[in-house]
Every structure is written in structure tokens, then in C-alpha cells.
Amino acid sequence: MKLLIIRHGQSSNNLLQETTGSFVGRSPDPVLTDLGQRQAARLAEAMRTGVQPAPAVLYSSLMVRAVQTAAVLAEALDVPVAGHLEAYECGGPYEGSPLHPKPHPGSPASVLHGITSRLNLPEGAGEQGWYRGDGEDDAARARRGARVIDDLKHRHLGQDVLVGLVCHEWISQHLIRAAIGFDAPGGLAEPWFSLNNTGTVLIDFEQPVPVTEVAHNGGSVERVLEWHNNCRHLAPDEISS
């Protein structure tokens, strides 16, 4: 099993923060901008032509910007999208400012299915939304990231398959750490792994790498971080954070 972590395309909240430096007017579940749609299309074409690896299995966070990104990829690759209930961004969907967040249930099933008919929603996602949380600290985020990785390994470890997961920059910090066994005290995401919009991270869970007996008691490493923040599918003026 190999895992390709994919950040969604630029969202309206990303653009708002970039252009105003403010959270005033943010959406609890923002959509992709025109640039975000173009970034997703560039990634889909790169996957179709072999510039970026093409997942045979595709999962997505249930936040709209991730589903919209996954929809473009799924159409190009002719695969379904499995919604993942725990792959949402840190803090979940919320209204208001990050300092005083009010939990939002997320978009209803009809809205998510309206993005793409290829989406398979998990149990717990319905017309009342899907998010039931009320915020989380660093340790809780790290535990959730580990649960997502454990779930994907449970489903696919031992298979010769590339699994794609469309998600978000902050939760990716914890996904990467859980995948490579790099735990930080208290779940703190330090150091930070930058991940631009539609940037990819490739992790191989089953690639034996010889290591020295002195360093590792004659064992072997089987988790390999192949690359991080790969944006080769984007032109320089299409790269955004």
C-alpha cells in the first residue's frame, strides 16, 4: 500500500485570508475558487498522463472544498470517491472566528451528492450534516490523524494499491506523523510540513529499506516518505497556500 495525501484546491477562505489577512466573512464550509478548480483540473490531468501518480482508490474529507477537488480527480480517473468521516480539517467546520468558533454540522448529504454522484457517504452523514464535534486540542487532532491512518491501513495494507486521500493542510500534519511514526510531544504539529493547494505527499508503507545493525538492531524500515508538497502539476503562478 502506498498513500497519496492530497490537499484540496484553493478555497474561498484561503483567498480571503490571503487577500485581507482577516477571517471576517469566512464560510464554515467554503467552496473552491476559480483558481482552486483550475488547480484540481491540473492535478487530474497530471494523474491521467502520469506526471503525478494516479490513485486506484480515492477517499475524501467531507468538507465541500475537498469533495469538489476529489470530484475532479474521480472523473478523470473514473473511480468512486469514499467519504471519510474523520479526515476533516482540524477544528472541524465552524462559524465565526477561530478565537470564538461555533461548531457547524457541515454540508448536508444532498449538497455533497450534488457535487458528484461518484461520492459514497459513510454512515453518519445525512441531511443534518455529518460533524458532531465541538473543537479539539493538539492531542485530540493527533489521535484522530492516527485513527485515519490506522483505518486506511486496516483496509488496504498488504495490497498493491495506491490510495488517495483528499484532505487539508492542518490535519495532514498529523496524518504524516502517524504514517511515519514521527510523534511530537502533546500532539503539537512542530515542525510544520508546508502543503500548498493540491500539493501531494507520497508515503510507501511496504518498501523494505536496509538499515545498519548499529542504528536499528538489524531491523528494516518499511515506511518511506517518498516526497512532500509535490506541486509539479502547477505553473508557478498557480501555486497558492
Image (cartoon, grey):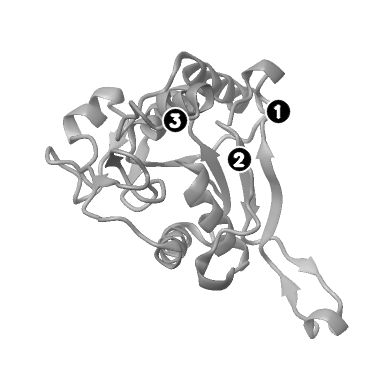
**Residue at the (37%, 34%) spot, across then down:** 80
Q: Which residue lies under the disc numbered 2?
A: 195
Please name the amino acid that badge 1 sits on.
Arg
Sequence order check, earlier mark of 2 and 3: 3
As measured in the structure, the alpha-carbon distance from the residue carrying label 1 to the one carrying label 2 is 13 Å
The secondary element bearing badge 3 is classed as loop
Q: Which residue lies under the disc numbered 3?
A: 22
Please name the amino acid that badge 3 sits on.
Ser
Q: Are marks 1 and 3 in contact (CB under 8 Å)?
A: no
Q: Position of residue 27 (x, y in %)?
A: 31, 30
Quadrant in which the N terminus is drawn: bottom right
Q: Position of residue 30 (x, y in %)?
A: 35, 28
Q: Nearer the viewer, mark 1 or mark 3?
A: 3
**Residue at the (31%, 33%) spot, across then down:** 29
**Residue at the (52%, 58%) spot, across then down:** 174
Sequence order check, earlier mark of 1 and 2: 2
How many C-alpha atoms fall within 10 Å of the one at disc 2: few (<14), some, or many (≥20)?
many
Please name the amino acid that badge 2 sits on.
Leu
As measured in the structure, the alpha-carbon distance from the residue carrying label 2 to the one carrying label 3 is 21 Å
Sequence order check, earlier mark of 1 and 3: 3
